[in-house]
Image: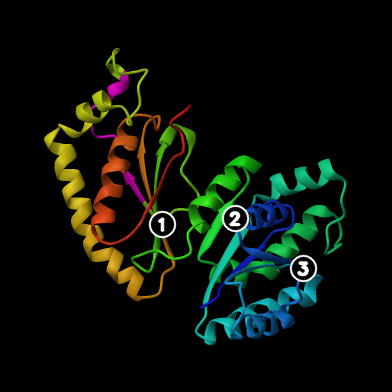
Amino acid sequence: MAEYLIVAGMSGAGRSSAAATLEDMGWFVIDNLPPSLIGKVADLASHPGSELDRFCFVAGRGGLESMNELVPAIETLRSSGARVRVLFLDASDEVLVRRYEGSRRRHPLEADGVLESIRLERDLLRPIRESAEVVIDTSSVNVHQLRDRLQELFSSKESPGGMETSVVSFGFKHGLPLDVDLVLDCRFLPNPHWVEALRPHTGLDEDVREYVLERPEAQEFLARITDLLEFLLPAYAKEGKSYLSIAIGCTGGRHRSVAIAEELAKAIRAQGFAPTVHHRDIDR
């Protein structure tokens, strides 16, 4: 069965970059397709003999009328039983204004000034954002980071557990990840940063891994999280959740959170899922 990805979001938040990345990943990307035609394309894709099985519709470039038609089009496609996912790209008003000023492009809504256009568009897109399985805030994300994130989320066609999962390690001093479902804090564990021999290494190195995981509190932490996920993962999948992203944080994002994230990913794989693992701040 074909699967469909709807890419929507704020103008200037990265839809063009996302479309290019997804096309490179093998998705059949259709940009600026009127929402009223999404169902017709899906009908063609379902015909016997079709060799295409992954379609990406980049939405939101057709002005006010197009935005109003998008939510019903998504609901109709979902009612057909097809696998439909919605990716919403967002960014702060300040960043969007700066991007428009830098590009000197006109905002598609053409309200009274760029900022007012952005605020109007945000209000119009609120129902789509609320229906999205994945929301990525690109305010502090460059093109390469966005590409990496999309590859983590959409490179595989199907997760063995029926729900795609990801584990990300991060450092609290660099800010919380903006597009995760669960956040866990492992700063209570002894910090390898204060051990001179371990400081240059990361949680991927065996000496740091042993330092972190040999602690009884680390083992209990992992055991309790594993028990929780044994309950949560099947429950989320049963309810039809397409993605679950779990973030593990420590102070800098190089040692404790990396080691814990790797172990947590192993536990998730043992439950029949295929998580991706990303260490956001390991090189900082």
The circle drawn on residue 181 is 1
Please provide the residue range marked out in magenta. 183-193
The residue at 22%/62% (across/down) is: 230
Q: Position of residue 79 (x, y in %)?
A: 53, 86
The circle drawn on residue 25 is 2
Pick the front one: 77 or 274: 274
Residue 49 falls inside the magenta stretch = no
Q: Secondary structure at mark 3?
A: loop
**Distance from Cα at disc 2 to Cα at disc 1:** 25 Å
- Which is nearer the N-term, disc 3 or disc 2? 2
Q: Which residue is mark 3?
A: 32
Which residue type does callout 2 highlight? Met
Image: 258 above or below 11 = above
Question: Taking 161 as reference, is 62 left or right?
Answer: right
Specify few, some or many for label 3: CA neighbours under 10 Å numbering under 14, 14-19, or 20 or more: few
Q: Are marks 3 and 2 in contact (CB under 8 Å)?
A: no
The circle drawn on residue 170 is none
Pick the front one: 79 or 48: 48
Q: Position of residue 25 (x, y in %)?
A: 59, 55
Which of discs 2 and 1 lies nearer the camera? The answer is 2
Which residue type does callout 1 highlight? Asp
- Which is nearer the N-term, disc 1 or disc 3? 3
Which of discs 3 and 2 lies nearer the camera? The answer is 2
